[in-house]
């Protein structure tokens, strides 16, 4: 029988937490909302950072805040929060195993960010980060168990089911290394 049939609080049962990370705009929050509807408790790391006063100086050009990720990790673990899934583009700094990196083909990521109304500079910065596998590389450096899921041309509910595969231990097809945007990268030069 598949464990997934039990659905709710599955990760707590197994004493498992998942970090869901990825380039801004890749769909972490959307997927988390689907998982929440399936019974998982999720924590939005951006809200946590704001609520705990962990925002540093504002970068006015990028319209983002500096965050001391070492301090974030300390505060997060000190709080001993009881969540199944922690989502945010800094979630891989929390040393949570497994860490799942959501990926998206740069051309589609661009459309998603345009629809969100982001400005050109922010879109370009994030596309470049995605093309260079920036978050995946950081995650591999910082976390023990890292998997990546391609969200391109998938509905959020499909991506959520793939995250559930990882929860179920069906990780083989999500081992890092198969996602490669180099063709798109070269065609954009
Ligand atoms: N699988 C998907 N297919 C199509 N559009 C998607 C998908 N997932 C998310 N989107 C859309 O892409 C945009 C970004 O999604 P979302 O806000 O979930 O990204 P995020 O990774 O949480 O970004 P951030 O790091 O800025 O919080 C939203 O407009 C959302 O509706
Ligand atoms: Mg989000």
Image (spheres, grey):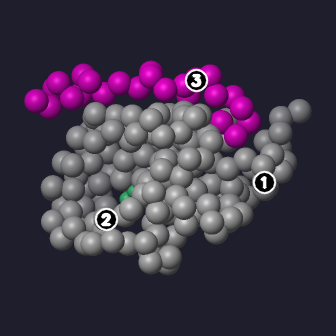
3 or 96, nearer to the observer: 96
Relative to 47, is 8 on the left or the right? right
> Dot 3 surroundings within 10 Å: few (below 14), some, or many (20 or more)?
few
Vertical placement of 33 versus 164: above or below? below
Q: Say which label, 1 or 3, has the lower sequence index.
A: 1
Q: Mark on residue 173?
A: 3
152 or 59, nearer to the observer: 59
Q: Mark on residue 66?
A: 2
Please report the bounds of the magenta region as a residue range.
Answer: 166-189
**For the residue labelled by badge 1, is the local secondary structure a helix, a strand or a loop?**
helix
Given this view, does label 1 or label 3 mark the residue nearer the observer? 1
8 or 64, nearer to the observer: 64
> Dot 1 surroundings within 10 Å: few (below 14), some, or many (20 or more)?
some
Residue corresponding to mark 1: 12
Q: Residue at x 42, y 57 (%)?
A: 69
Q: Quadrant of the N terminus?
A: top right
Q: Is residue 177 found inside the magenta-colored segment of the image?
A: yes
The residues tagged by marks 1 and 2 sit, at their Cα atoms, a distance apart of 31 Å
The answer to which image quadrant residue 58 occupies is bottom left
């Amino acid at each position: 029988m598949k464990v997934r049939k039990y659905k709710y609080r599955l990760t707590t049962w197994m004493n498992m937490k998942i970090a869901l990370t990825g380039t801004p705009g890749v769909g972490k929050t959307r997927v988390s909302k689907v998982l929440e509807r399936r019974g998982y408790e999720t924590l939005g790391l951006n809200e946590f950072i704001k609520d705990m006063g962990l925002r540093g100086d504002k970068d006015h050009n990028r319209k983002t805040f500096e965050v001391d990720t070492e301090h974030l990790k300390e505060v997060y673990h000190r709080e001993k929060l009881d969540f199944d899934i922690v989502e945010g583009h800094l979630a891989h700094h929390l040393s949570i195993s497994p860490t799942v990196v959501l990926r998206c083909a740069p051309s589609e990521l661009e459309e998603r960010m345009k629809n969100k109304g982001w400005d050109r500079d922010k879109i370009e910065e994030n596309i470049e980060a995605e093309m260079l596998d920036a978050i995946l590389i950081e995650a591999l450096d910082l976390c023990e168990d890292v998997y990546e899921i391609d969200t391109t041309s998938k509905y959020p509910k499909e991506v959520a089911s793939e995250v559930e595969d990882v929860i179920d231990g069906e990780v083989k097809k999500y081992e890092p290394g198969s996602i490669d945007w180099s063709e798109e990268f070269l065609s954009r030069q």
